[in-house]
Image (cartoon, helix red, strand yellow):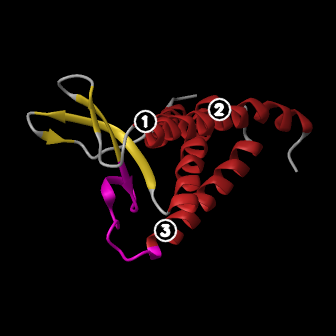
Amino acid sequence: MPPRANRVAALPWFILSLFLLSLDQLTKLLVIQLIPMGGVIVLTDFLNLVHVHNSGAAFSFLADAGGWQRWFLSGLALAVCLVLGVLLWRAPHQRLFAAAASLVIGGALGNLIDRLSMGAVVDFVDLHVAGWHWPAFNLADSVIMIGAGLFILDEIRRVRQKELPT
């Protein structure tokens, strides 16, 4: 078990994950209540709010796989959250890594709740230009992508520190 100082230092990062999870679920609840399935609210020339469900992964990958993907993706999300949670618990003072892990955990749990409760993830952000639409996404997807970017940045920073002459 990590020292008490690590457990205390990890708490704010887990609270951040819980906050992002809550915010994700709140936005999805609002979409479900305010926009009918398949509905569109035009906000700007490039941004709509929509109400769609994605039974697959990013970009609807595996969406037509027949149902097994629900359990596979749920298990994968749970495994990722557990591994990142343990790593975060052990290294909460590595701020960039901890922030990245917190974002990915919060987002993955948000989408996991959707998969387990509805069999699909609620997506609602529709970006588009000249008739071309980016696949719809949600807050959980956004924080997962930001977290992934922070992991890459953290690793680049770590590699550069090793390369510096001593």
Q: Earlier in the sequence, mark 2 or mark 1?
A: 2
Give neighbour class at mark 1: few <14, some 14-19, many 20+ (Cα, 10 Å): few
Q: Amino acid at mark 1?
A: Leu
Residue indicated by mark 2: 19
Q: Amino acid at mark 2?
A: Phe
- Would you say residue 86 is visible in this rendering? yes
Mark 3 and 2 residues: CB-CB less than 8 Å, in contact? Answer: no
Q: Earlier in the sequence, mark 3 or mark 1?
A: 1
Quarter location, residue 57? bottom left
- Would you say residue 155 is visible in this rendering? no
Residue indicated by mark 3: 70
Measure the alpha-carbon separation of dots 3 and 1.
26 Å
Residue that lies at the very extreme toward the right in this rendered image: 4
- Which segment did they paint magenta? 52-68
Give neighbour class at mark 2: few <14, some 14-19, many 20+ (Cα, 10 Å): some
The location of residue 89, given as percent across then percent down, is 76, 44
